[in-house]
Amino acid sequence: MNRPLIIIYTAIVLDALGIGLIFPILPALLKEVTHSADVAPYIGALTALYAAMQFIFAPVLGTLSDRIGRRPVLLISLGGAAVNYLLLAFAPSLWLLFLGRAIAGLTSANTAVAAAFITDISAEDTRARRFGLMSAMFGIGFIAGPVTGGFLGDHWLRLPFIAAALLNGCNFLLALFVLPETRKPTAGRFDPASLNPLRPLRWALSMKGMLPVILIFFLFSFTGEAYGVSWALWGHDVFGWNGFWIGLSLGTFGICQTLTQIFLPGPVARILGERGAILTGIGGASIALTTMAFTHHGWMVFALMPVFTLAGIGVPALQSLATRMVDDTQQGRFQGVVQAIISLSSIIAPLAFSAIYFSFQSTWPGAVWLSVVAVYTLAVPFVLMLPTAKRRVEPA
């Protein structure tokens, strides 16, 4: 593995570790700041604010990375995240917490720039494997983050947020002094209209064959939100799991998912093609979710993990295919659009899955997993519309 890839993967791990550090502590911080026991509405509002800002500004930052280079935009993003964590660490009032999340969402382009960076330095036949490794690195950081955050939070409630700010500071220095630039700034007059948040979305949707890609990204991200909403509730309602078993199941899932994304996307994409790899991921997830919907035995959840985590090969394969359909000069713009679509799904999907879960909670909690299968099923026709040959799509 070459040095630039090691650096960008390290940056992704540190980024995910910082996010995971605050994950178990945020409710307690909100209780301290608001002096209220019911903080669920505040968590929902903070999450929605972050996603909304990311939806608006991720395409702009992606476009800027094509114009001025990857490193400056990554530095802006890391700086915004550090400011957010510092505000969370020291904010005495609720409005400062909201300000911090707004800044973090506005400057959040880490994933989009990292994906564009990997595209810049990777041959087409290695992208599925490298995007799989990118997802795995994020998974490793996110597995370690909550455990570390919980430990630090037991010593001082604000300590995880300071640690997250320090990690982002390390990331900033790494990008500033070590990470090479992979996209030279574009010469010529700067068009302020390129900063219109809707312009990259219109550009992506105007390209022949790109609508199915955008819809699949949206639907895949949509399904991912179901687990954050329903997993803990379902485990408690169906199996009587306590916090330990819920954590163990999520940790097992995270480990299996990471291993899947490290070892499988590249080989499966080479053997079946990217479209076949995406369908394999959908099939594995659907089999596992359908079984989970009807099971009353907790051990079956653990037995299904290897099949369940086959879903992890779908997104890297889709990313690899999509980057071939976009010109090299527009990769940052496209990755920003993808990040915006993912943000949009993270606003809508939790509301949908929570409504479904609470509608069936008293009679059949597992029904929520069939709704996830239904969303995957909606994606299948769009997957079949994807190109199989190596070609670029030109603007309509």
Image (tube, rainbow, N blue to C red):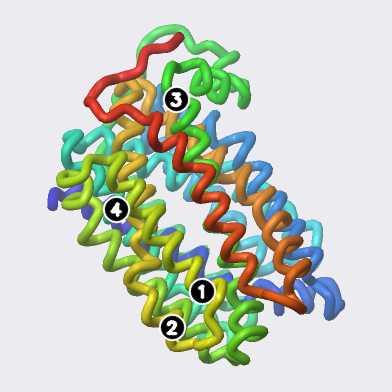
In the picture as drawn, the residue positioned furthest to the left comes out as 1
Residue 83: quadrant of the picture: bottom right
Query: What crowding class fits label 2: few (fewer than 14 Cα within 10 Å), some (14-19), or many (20 or more)?
Result: few
Q: Give the mark nearer the N terminus: 1 vs 4.
A: 4
- Foreground: disc 3 or disc 2: 2
Residue wearing tag 2:
300
Q: Give the mark nearer the N terminus: 3 vs 1.
A: 3
228, 268: nearer the viewer: 268
Q: Do tag 1 and tag 2 residues touch (Cβ < 8 Å)?
A: yes
Spatial CA distance of label 1 from label 2 is: 8 Å
Query: What crowding class fits label 1: few (fewer than 14 Cα within 10 Å), some (14-19), or many (20 or more)?
Result: many
- The correct choice, above or below, for 302 with respect to 194 in the image is below
Q: Quick check: 106 left or right of 127?
A: right
Spatial CA distance of label 2 from label 4 is: 26 Å
- The correct choice, above or below, for 70 with respect to 248 in the image is above
- The correct choice, above or below, for 74 with respect to 16 in the image is above
State the image coordinates of residue 195 (x, y, percent, origin top left).
Answer: 58, 22
Spatial CA distance of label 3 from label 2 is: 39 Å
The circle on residue 292 is 1
Residue wearing tag 3:
210
Whether residue 148 is visible: no
Spatial CA distance of label 3 from label 1 is: 33 Å
State the image coordinates of residue 115 (x, y, percent, origin top left).
Answer: 35, 41
Query: What crowding class fits label 3: few (fewer than 14 Cα within 10 Å), some (14-19), or many (20 or more)?
Result: many
